[in-house]
Amino acid sequence: MSNKFIAGLIENKDKPIKYLYLRFVGFIEKAFTYYYLKKHGVQTKYGYVKLIGLPIIRKHPFSSIVIGQGVTLVSKTSGNILGINHPTILATLHKDAKIKIGKNSGLSGASIIAVDSITIGENVGIGANCYVYDSDFHAINSKLRKMQKGIQDLRKAKYSPIKIGNDVFIGLGVSILKGVTIGSEAAVGAGSIVTKDIKRKTIVAGNPAKFIKNIV
Ligand SMILES: CC(C)(COP(=O)(O)OP(=O)(O)OC[C@H]1O[C@@H](n2cnc3c(N)ncnc32)[C@H](O)[C@@H]1OP(=O)(O)O)[C@@H](O)C(=O)NCCC(=O)NCCS
């Protein structure tokens, strides 16, 4: 028995059954989450991730999805008071694609779709129903587009990595497009389409997202 467990029992000595029950439920939840993520090829550790509803994970077998400690993924409508319109989706669509989510970050009904690389820093809050995708998926030139034969040809469309720094706040319903780097402690207004880099400690908003003010 661990010291933490014994300390918990002593602290809850007037209601030990409730304490043991909550410990048991917590263990089952963590074990299931770990199993579910591992089954889908996600690199994480036992107890690192909290799932509220089940995310959709589509991982190319040779790609990587790494999730840090204290990350929450919300995938059911009632899991966020604003209402989630679809489960969180994590997808790596190419053998070299990478998704990394830093510790203590939270995603609610977000679609994170990587053909190249999407890095989300630590303590990042991604508001309900956001899209982060590092590719156009389809070539813009119609001749090239007709030549695309499906998922194996995704890299015929433009793609470029996305980097979101630490402590960034992203509002409801934002889309972040290929090649964008967001500096640490920046904020993005609700409903924005982010097409260009955002400097650290600034607020941007709109379509396309433009500088609004510095964060003091
Ligand atoms: C970005 C945000 C945080 C800025 O708040 P703020 O500092 O109080 O900014 P203000 O309300 O003073 O707005 C400053 C300017 O930006 C504009 N603006 C603010 N948010 C905007 C948005 N989402 N889209 C477009 N323009 C926006 C305002 O109209 C205003 O323009 P003006 O100077 O021409 O009048 C806030 O507007 C926002 O989008 N909040 C939503 C956060 C959210 O989605 N939370 C839920 C997460 S699940």
Image (cartoon, rainbow, N blue to C red):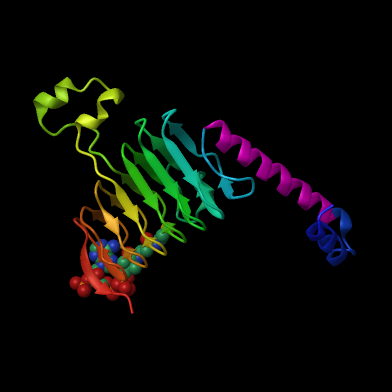
Task: State the residue lying farthest toward the right.
Answer: 14
Which is more toward the observer, 1 or 194? 1
Segment colored magenta:
18-40
Instruction: Specify whether residue 87 is in view.
Output: no
Residue in the picture at 44% in, 28% down: 61
Q: In the rendered view, would you say 185 is above or below 29?
A: below
User: Residue 197: image x %, image y %?
Assistant: 23, 58
Instruction: Specify whether residue 154 is in view.
Output: yes
> Residue 70 lies in what quarter of the image?
bottom right
User: Residue 6: image x %, image y %?
Assistant: 85, 59
Residue in the picture at 25% in, 46% down: 178
Picture quarter with the C terminus: bottom left
Does the magenta portion include 165?
Answer: no
User: Residue 168: image x %, image y %?
Assistant: 38, 63
In the picture, measured across the screen, residue 82 lies left or right of residue 159, that is right
The overriding secondary structure of the stretch rendered in magenta is helix
In the picture, measured across the screen, residue 62 lies left or right of residue 46, that is left
User: Residue 144: image x %, image y %?
Assistant: 13, 26
Which is more toward the observer, 88 or 137? 137
Residue in the picture at 64% in, 45% down: 46
Does the magenta portion include 36?
Answer: yes
Q: Quadrant of ligand 1?
A: bottom left
Which is more toward the observer, 4 or 193? 4
Residue in the picture at 50% in, 47% down: 67
